[in-house]
Amino acid sequence: MADYLGWAGTLTAILLGLPQLIRLARTRNVEGLSLPAWQAFLAVGIGWTAHGITIGQAPQIVASALSLASTIPILYLLSRHLHRNFLLTLLPGLVLAAIMIGIDQIFGSGAYGAVALIPAVIANAGQSVALIRAPHVGGVSVLFLILAVLNQVLWLAWSILVADLGTMIAAGTTGTIALFNLIWYTARQLGVPPIWPTTASPERELSRPG
């Protein structure tokens, strides 16, 4: 059962970023997207790839490594649309990932799970803030939000079966925030207005000179 859940989590993790990448590439619309959130997703992908190698779990290695195939292009498109240097855009995620890997190697899985919450919460809570404050959320893919919830549910069940404390901590917390994002996105689509809306719309950011 653990193997089935692990590979199911792998499949959803691989597919997770694709809907958002396709939507962003097709529409060039960044409304409701959070750059810090995707920088944190980069750290999550790298950090959990290394953690999977450390604990010898192939599903986690494959899922986390292949998730980068959508995260990095999304960051490239966001940096281009927001007129930011691509390498500097990657830097915060790379630094966070290095910190996560170091803690995993020195202090073990439990400490890693607690620290891994930081980029996971930044990623999902950052997206929460964007969904709450953005004047419009047309740039966000609802399929991405649905897969985010499903992915964390699968990894939480997997971590319980294999008794990996780090994944239990991270998946439980991240899944809760991901569920909030899906609910709030639905509310926005049903007409709930933004709270403390941002002063500049994404369209203005797109037209801002570099």
Image (cartoon, rainbow, N blue to C red):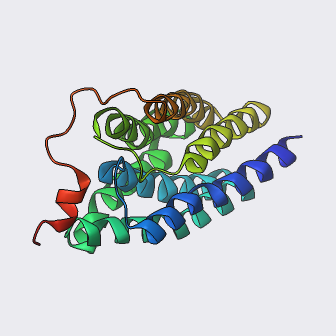
Give the image quarter of residue 202: bottom left
In this rendered view, identify the residue nearer to me: 2 or 138.
Answer: 138
Q: How many marks?
A: 0
Picture residue at 89% right of the left edge, 40% below the top: 1
Q: Position of residue 128 (x, y in %)?
A: 39, 35
Picture residue at 33% right of the left edge, 49% below the top: 34
Q: Position of residue 208 (x, y in %)?
A: 12, 65
Give the image quarter of residue 191: top left
In this rendered view, identify the residue nearer to me: 200 or 95.
Answer: 200
Q: Position of residue 163 (x, y in %)?
A: 73, 32
For the C terminus, the image quarter is bottom left
In this rendered view, identify the residue nearer to me: 138 or 133.
Answer: 138
User: Which residue is the extreme one toward the front?
Assistant: 191
The answer to whether residue 126 is above or below residue 93 is above
Side of 166 where 81 appears, left or right = left
Side of 2 where 88 appears, left or right = left
Is residue 57 in view from this perspective? no
